[in-house]
Image (spheres, rainbow, N blue to C red):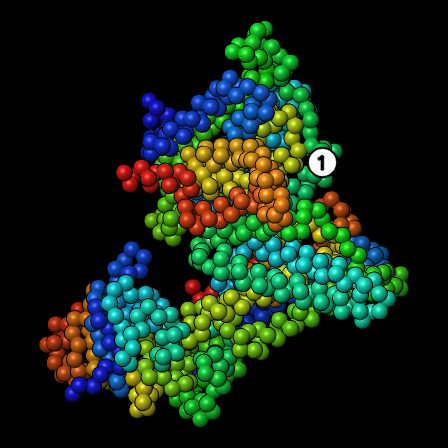
Amino acid sequence: MTVNPLLSLQGVHTHIGPYHILQGVDLTVPEGGVTVLLGRNGAGKTTTLRTIMGLWQASKGEIHFHDHMITGLATPEISRRGIAFVPEDMGIFTDLTVEENMILAAVNGPMDAKRLAWIKDLFPPIGTFWASPAGTLSGGQKQMLSVARAIIEPRRLILIDEPTKGLAPAIVKAMIDALAELKATDTTILLVEQNFAMASSIGDTVAVMDDGRIIHSGSMQELAGDSALQEKLMGLSLEAHQ
Amino acid sequence: MLTRLLSGDTPRSSLLTVLLLIVLVSLAFAPFLFPGTKSLETAARICIFIVLVASYDLLLGYAGIVSFAHTMFFGIGAYGTSLALSATGASYWSLLWGTAAGAVVAAVFALAIGLFSLRVKAIFFAMVTLAVASAFAVLVSQMSWLTGGEDGLNYKIPRELTPAFKLVKDKVFDVRINGKLLAYYLVFFASAILFLVMLRIVNSPFGRTLKAVRDNAFRAEAIGYRVVWYRTAATVLSAVMAALAGSLLAIWLRYTGPATTLSMEIMIDILLMVVIGGMGTLYGAVLGATLFILAQTYLQNLMGVAAEATEAVPLLSSLVAPERWLLWLGVLFVLSVYFFPAGIVGRLREGARGR
Amino acid sequence: MSEQAIKPRIEKIPLSEQVFRKLPIFLVPLLALAGLIAIGNPASWLTLTVAGLAMGMMVFIMASGLTVVFGLMDVINFGHGAFVTVGAFVGFTVLAWVAGWTASPSVLLNLAAVLVAILAAMLVTGLLGYAFERVIVMPVYGDHLKQILVTMGGLIVAQQMIHVVWGPDEMHLSRPEALQGSVVLGEAAIEKYRLVAVGIGLALFLAMRHVLKKTKIGLLVRAGVENGEMVEALGYRIRRLFLLVFMTGSALAGLGGVMWGLYQETITAHMGSDIMVLVFIVVIIGGLGSVEGCFIGALLVGLLANYTAFLAPKVALISTIALMVAILMWRPQGLYPVVKAK
């Protein structure tokens, strides 16, 4: 099968101040489905996402999105090529209402009513607190709003950074369901996750990071079925989170 | 011995050493090398401004804090000395206590402003000092019963420091050895000592911590340094030094007024001198102050010639008019901040390393 | 796992906190009341209050751009005063050109002259803002120290250029006929121009609020103040937004300059840096980045300055500093602290 990957990183290095965080990341994200980026804290997962978004500049290497090189482009350009970003801190504008957050997320004009109805169906609190300041939402609701913003317009690729971190189990489940439904539409997801249960329940392909490099990539099925490999790759790092 | 006197902070560039020596020798023998009232005035101003600019660099260059209240402290010192001299007579005693009082008041003010506004952001401090300093200047010019208002204060200083006092009857090398000369050497040596003291401060453990705080306040705090304390201490030290420089000015001029000490123009001059000379190195203050004051005094003549030469071209001639010299210094200032943030001294040291 | 509440909920803000947040609004009438008690004479009080409001509105117009620029990009422009001065000089020059209109008894022609002067001043200062942002500010993003130094340098150069273009002398100009004189209200005489200034200031504040609350650009500005990175990640070019805000702020400073000039009827090359002291006090009192705070701060400063100028003229400027100190003791970040994501 020689389908061109939607996103590919080749030998990407990123420096933040004096620190050399990414040390030659090679990663491919195939079109369609969910690719999960696993790894312990500080492995460079968040930096990888931020480098793809252009929020941090790669000092070496190339990033291709849909056959175009996007390294060195400004963040808004990258975003407008069809990549949405759900950061770890959710990036909610707390001073604005839920509605205003959504209005801004619809970059290309007014929101599509059908799509909005679908989102409110996926995340009921969005509708409930439509006119409230986003700052008054709870953590889980903010996470939902952050994902909702990313999908209010059709995007080819969504980068999501640890959407279940610190959330209650019921909200985690709602989030998994939402992502599963999103997967069924024509959207590719690159998901950073430490929770292997969540990752294996939704992921199609998987890449494992350590010390600023990808140390394994393959299908999720293979990894989920091979506990020896899990042990080898992440025994220490993921144990605590299962 | 010499290295110890400089606290181990040598110029580290042969060209810089030569320039500094030229400045030192010229100032030390100014009355004999450049006879005439105007050149002696210029030399004394250079001495005083070296101290003033160096004390500002303590704050800007070493602590990374922008203050617009430096002339306020300069003025407090000057007014302290002159008020004491006018109130309790032209004695050395009034000179001394006035100077000390000025320094103490400056320290208290600096402490209050520092504790009050250094907790937040550099920008905040800059804005607060700007507001406070302007209010102070207005207040001083309004309290005419005490300060003489806009006209300022004229007062007598001890007779031994005035031209009327003759130390030696005959001229030495064609120069009158009178009280004015003594006053000059008082200014010169006091400035030299204050400069060496500041050199000691910045090269002490305190000075090094200050730089660490400047470069990464967050990290310094994490390691366990009380960032606010260090910044406030730097503010107070710099204020005291500025006040002492103000006292020297008061003694030298025998006059103190808002225009010579408190004005925003002087504040801007200080900024220009620090940046052009080189932030974060006290030697920059020496070169910056010297060049700036020489330019202020003599460049304007040169520009007058240029203006006459270009009289036929309307806009150009007003651009090079002598009054517009600050325009060109302003441009130079902006360019220095962009391209040579380490100023002249930084360039010279870089050149020395390159070889 | 943490035992968080699962059902959707809204964190209710306690009533006391809500009152606390709104508290600064009451400071203005409170100060006016204190002024009335201290002054005693209602007629003088009314005159002073209108004067104070007029002054506050003008300072607000000049300060608003500065505070939004800071909120959005963490940039403080110490050269902002240059736009005030340039605006005043351009406005006066235009008014001098149309001297026939300003001297005419026709109110319409008078106002047309002022309008043309204001538009010209705003156009010039807006364009100057563009140049200033590109040449002076852009290279020093993220470095406060250099920002302060460089914008100060820009101020020096701008002030000198004013001397080059308009000569070293101050400029005098009388207000147009229609804006001279006073209206008498009971025993109080209120200068007409002050009422106009209050009107313009109020209209501008309401317009600004409307833009910030109801338009997409306004939403973007507010979002950008809180988290510029996320605005970019959504696909907006925040640099362009910032340039727009910077130019608007500069144009407003120019407008403030014309209004201030007409108020004083005399302008000098350093008027901008003189007013900047008040502007900074106002911006600090309001909370860096907050338009509402800036508005309230400006009114407080205007009222207080006028009351003290009447009661104890020597301490007028000191009193505004004292106000700043008092407010910072109460709220170290100003009246309306701005939420920052990082």
Residue type of the residue flagged with mark 1 = Gly
| Residue at image location 71% in from the left, 58% down from the top | C93
Instruction: Indicate left or right for B150 with C217 as reference.
Output: right
Q: Residue at x 48, y 69 (%)?
A: C240
User: If the image is split into quadrants, where does the N terminus of chain C sit?
Assistant: bottom left
Q: What percent of the width, then of the height, locates residue C81?
A: 61, 54
Direction from residue A71 to residue C45 in the image, left or right: right
- Asked if residue A200 is positioned above or below residue B256 in the image, the reply reads below
The residue beneath circle 1 is B149
- Is residue B6 or residue C83 the one in the foreground? C83
Q: Quadrant of residue A24?
A: bottom left
Q: Work out whether residue B100 or residue B282 is closer to the camera in this orientation and state it.
A: B282
Q: Residue at x 52, y 43 (%)?
A: B329
* Left or right: where A107 falls relative to C292: left
Mark 1 is surrounded, within 10 Å at the Cα level, by few (under 14), some (14 to 19) or many (20 or more) other residues, namely some
Viewer-side residue, C306 vs B307: B307
Please provide percent x and percent y for residue C224: 48, 69
Location of the C terminus of chain C by quadrant is: bottom left
Q: Residue C302 appears in which quarter of the rendering?
A: bottom right
Q: From what the image shows, is residue C10 above or below residue C263?
A: below
Point out the residue furthest to the front here: B312
The residue at the far top in this view is: B169
Compared to C328, does C337 lie above or below? below
